[in-house]
Amino acid sequence: MTDHAIKELAPTEAVLLDIDGTLLDSNDAHVRSWLDAFGAHGRTFAYGQVRPLIGKGSDKLLQELLRIGDADPLSQRLKDERRDIFLQRYLGALRPTPGARELVRKLRDEEIRVVVATAAGAPELEALLRQAGVHDLIEEATTEDDAERSKPDPDIVLAALQRAGVQPVEAMLIGDTPHDVEAARAAGVDAIALRCGGWWDDAALAGAVAIYDSPAALLQGWEGSPIQRRRIPGG
């Protein structure tokens, strides 16, 4: 990127944060909870069939695996059971990703507005934020309940932009899946991808403007990060 290009970029006024796989090491637990819910209904899937779909909305996951839509009574039943299994059986053992709390604190210290943009539902949100150790630092969030279409459609990102009161060029999304990157790009927002979500290689995350191992790695490279570069007029 040239200095001239840097000068013309808007400052990063808001960062839109994913939770699962980004702030909390929870992607595997989501797979396990889906497999448990499916098994209770006599539906069997391999781990590798479900894992690539984590990060998409649950409606899209069910459509791809079972070919059922929201109008099917089984859809809501599976969503509810999966949520309860996750919260009761798996959540308590999960840990924040490296540097999760420190990253959110850094963003706040830099006076960058932080809005969570997650494919999770509202009933899970508070529990996820608490387990990630950031519940006291997050004041604004959008979930799948705030969007007509779930990730990787851009609706949740657009809702987060509206909540933040910024234009797409003034925001950046941090996520861990290609679905996050796709949703951000469809909304006109640059995305930073984190490898700590697991499963995907850098080629799958190639739509991001930068890729880091974890929140801690982003903090370590903060001065050269897209967030900081965009906040220094003239580069």
Image (spheres, rainbow, N blue to C red):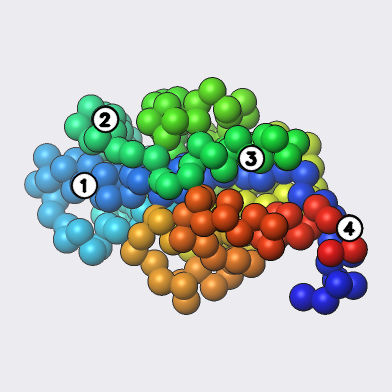
Left/right of residue 83 with respect to residue 207 in the rendered view: left
In terms of depth relative to the viewer, which is nearer, 140 or 49? 140
| Residue at the image point whose x is 62% and y is 52% from the top | 173
For marks 4 and 2, give the CA distance.
44 Å
Left/right of residue 75 with respect to residue 115 in the rendered view: left
- Residue 234, position as x, y percentages in the image: 90, 63
For marks 4 and 1, give the CA distance.
46 Å
Query: Which amino acid lies under the numbered mark 1 shown in the image of this protein?
Result: Arg
- Helix, strand or loop status at disc 2: helix
| Residue at the image point whose x is 36% and y is 53% from the top | 54
Q: Please report whichever mark, 1 or 2, sits nearer to the chain's N-terminal start.
A: 1
The answer to whether mark 3 and mark 2 are in CB contact below 8 A is: no
| Residue pointed to by mark 3 | 106
Q: Please report whichever mark, 4 or 2, sits nearer to the chain's N-terminal start.
A: 2
| Residue at the image point whose x is 82% and y is 76% from the top | 2
Residue 92 numbered mark, or none = 2
Q: Please report whichever mark, 3 or 1, sits nearer to the chain's N-terminal start.
A: 1
| Residue pointed to by mark 1 | 32
